Amino acid sequence: MPPAGSLDRCRLYLPARNLWAALTAELARRKMGEAPENLDKYQEIGRELQRSFRFSYLYPSEQYDGEWKAWLPCFEKGKSLCWRKEANFEIIPHSAFRGRLLDARPGTAIDPGTVSAAEKSLHETEVINPWWRGSQGKTEPVALKGYLFCKNQSIYSDLCRVNLLYMGGDIRYGLGKLVRVEMEKAERFFEYNVQLDLDDPRVFTGVVLAHTKANANNDLICGALERLGGWDMGTPIPMADTPFWIPGSRLVSDKWHEIREDGTWGTLL
């Protein structure tokens, strides 16, 4: 018997590509409006952002001693995927963390003949809650924390004027609204060392915090693999031939990782 409904799953983080796309759309609208003849210039802005910036993934964060501290994915021995707080290394299993962070919104299609719910159209959409579910009845706001690596000061000034973004495919339903809380200089990347004197910034860590392309040395890393696809200017992007290690996958030792134009990482083995 086929299922009567479906569930649209939600990632617990925001990929760098989505952030780049939202910023491209916002800057293009501010500079050129939405006229069809400006399509080529829209693409130029996107390419310029990729040349001038590197974006990290954004991870759910909560306040700790007055600072926003992220929850970062990590594969733990004997526990599979978990989430670790940046501040004090508290660890929560993936299933429990989903319960703290996510909610689901029900929906259905309307049958015009009966003006009632269409058969087998019931579905739910997972969303990131604006408030954490606390174990002791306390609620705290949810933020998304990430890093921006900049090489172009003029475009950086344009980005600093962007205080509101909409992310995801359901923004017309009021979802995906992000308001900037603060933006400040940093010397480390989620408390990891960085190298900034190269074309591609590098991060030194034993846990990858972005999708990382698999290579011939897969025995040096444990985690989970998935293939990536997407859309660009309304055209589907074929799935990559090579799968990617998901965020949280762990290496046997710390390594340098390059942050690439599309936000994915490349491990320097």
Image: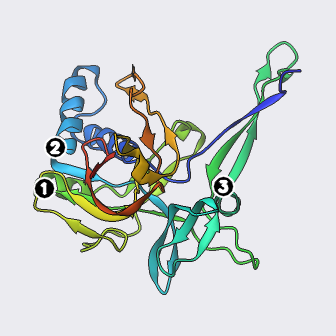
Residue 25 lies in quadrant: top left
Q: Is residue 75 left or right of residue 102?
A: left
Q: Amino acid at mark 2?
A: Arg
Judge by depth and name the residue closer to the eye, 166 or 15.
Answer: 15
Against 23, residue 148 (above or below) is: below
Q: Earlier in the sequence, mark 1 or mark 2?
A: 2
Residue under numbered circle 1? 151
Q: Is residue 268 left or right of residue 101?
A: left
Q: CA distance from mark 1 to mark 2?
A: 8 Å
Q: Amino acid at mark 1?
A: Lys
Residue at the extreme top: 113
Q: Amino acid at mark 3?
A: Leu
The residue at the point 88 percent across, 17 percent down is 114
Image quadrant for the N terminus? top right
Q: Earlier in the sequence, mark 3 or mark 2?
A: 2
The local crowd at label 3, few if under 14, some if 14 to 19, many if 20 or more residues have their Cα within 10 Å, is some
The local crowd at label 1, few if under 14, some if 14 to 19, many if 20 or more residues have their Cα within 10 Å, is some
SS assignment at label 3: strand
SS assignment at label 2: helix
x and y percentages locating residue 222 in the rendered image: 49, 52
x and y percentages locating residue 11 in the rendered image: 56, 47
